[in-house]
Amino acid sequence: MSMKLEGNILVTGTNRGIGLELVKQLAERTGGEAHIYACCRAPDDTKAEALRDLTTQYPGKITIIKLDMSDEASISAAVQAVKELIGDGGLNLVINNAAINKPDTPAPLSATGKKDMMDVYETNVVGPFLLAKMFLPLLQRAAEMKSPGEGDKMSCRRSAIINISTLISSIEKCPESFAIAQMYPYRTSKAALNMLTRCQAEDFKSHNILVTAIHPGWVRTQMGGEQAPLTPLDSVHGMLSTMSSLSNKDCGMLLDWQGNPIPW
């Protein structure tokens, strides 16, 4: 059964974990008109073998794009490559999934240095900021090309940015989990990503571009660890179902993978 997502869809951080599963399920469940641009830092590396296998499994459905979210020149080159491939079309959905976590969890204050803070901020916040800024013309074009559904003007089928955030970005909920995972760089970067989401939601709403942050749950990945209760398959299934139903009321919100709001 096809999902309610379509058009040109770009996903970052797709060589493993949640990003790889996003590409897989999008390829499986979207209609024939959808095309996925799967971005990763080293497309030819052995770590991207599973991603390359997906392009063979779904011929003509996936294009791999080289993208390092910590490198402005790499972001610019990736945007130009996508523009050339899309041509006169627009970009309907950007999923900012790529993120790093330094140092290793629990990342207490004593183990965290300036470089950790800056490296994580650069990838997790500045990267999504630049990507949205550079892709804005293509997102605007998509919003202009596709007529809105009844009632709501915004949707992930028309033009949207989804920033993958986290429950531990919540300032209100910080005391509930801080003792087991201090994670200064990761927490603060994702809180900043939430503000970026909020700012872009205000900035882009005049163009009918939806911007929303989503927490994927605690997922059993290299970053999430083996104790995490959610599989990538279940997390991504829930997130894509949530994305399919987003509308005007969800713009600028932080939601969990099932669509429930998370306090700032």
Image (tube, grey):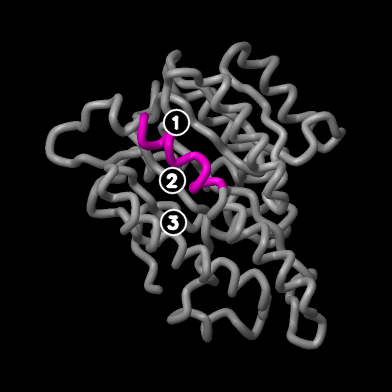
Residue 142 % position (x, y)? 36, 30
The mark total stands at 3
Residue at disc 1, secondary structure: loop
**67 in relation to 51, above or below:** below
Residue 210, horizontal then vertical, whole percent: 34, 46
Most foreground residue, 229 or 259: 259
The magenta segment is: 131-141
In the displayed orientation, state which residue is furthest to the right. 46
Residue density around tag 3, few if under 14, some if 14–19, many if 20 or more, within 10 Å: many
Query: Which is more foreground, mark 3 or mark 2?
Result: 2
What quarter of the picture does the C terminus occupy? bottom left
Mark 2 or mark 3, which is nearer the start of the sequence?
A: 2
Label 2 secondary element: strand
Q: Dot 3 corresponds to which residue?
A: 213
- The circle on residue 161 is 2
Q: Amino acid at mark 1?
A: Leu
Q: Using the numbered discs, state the Cα–Cα distance from disc 1 to disc 2 in whole angstroms.
A: 10 Å
Q: CA distance from mark 3 to mark 2?
A: 8 Å
Question: What's the amino acid at mark 3?
Answer: Ala
Where on the picture, by quarter, is residue 157? top left
Q: Earlier in the sequence, mark 1 or mark 3?
A: 1
Q: Is residue 167 above or below residue 252?
A: below
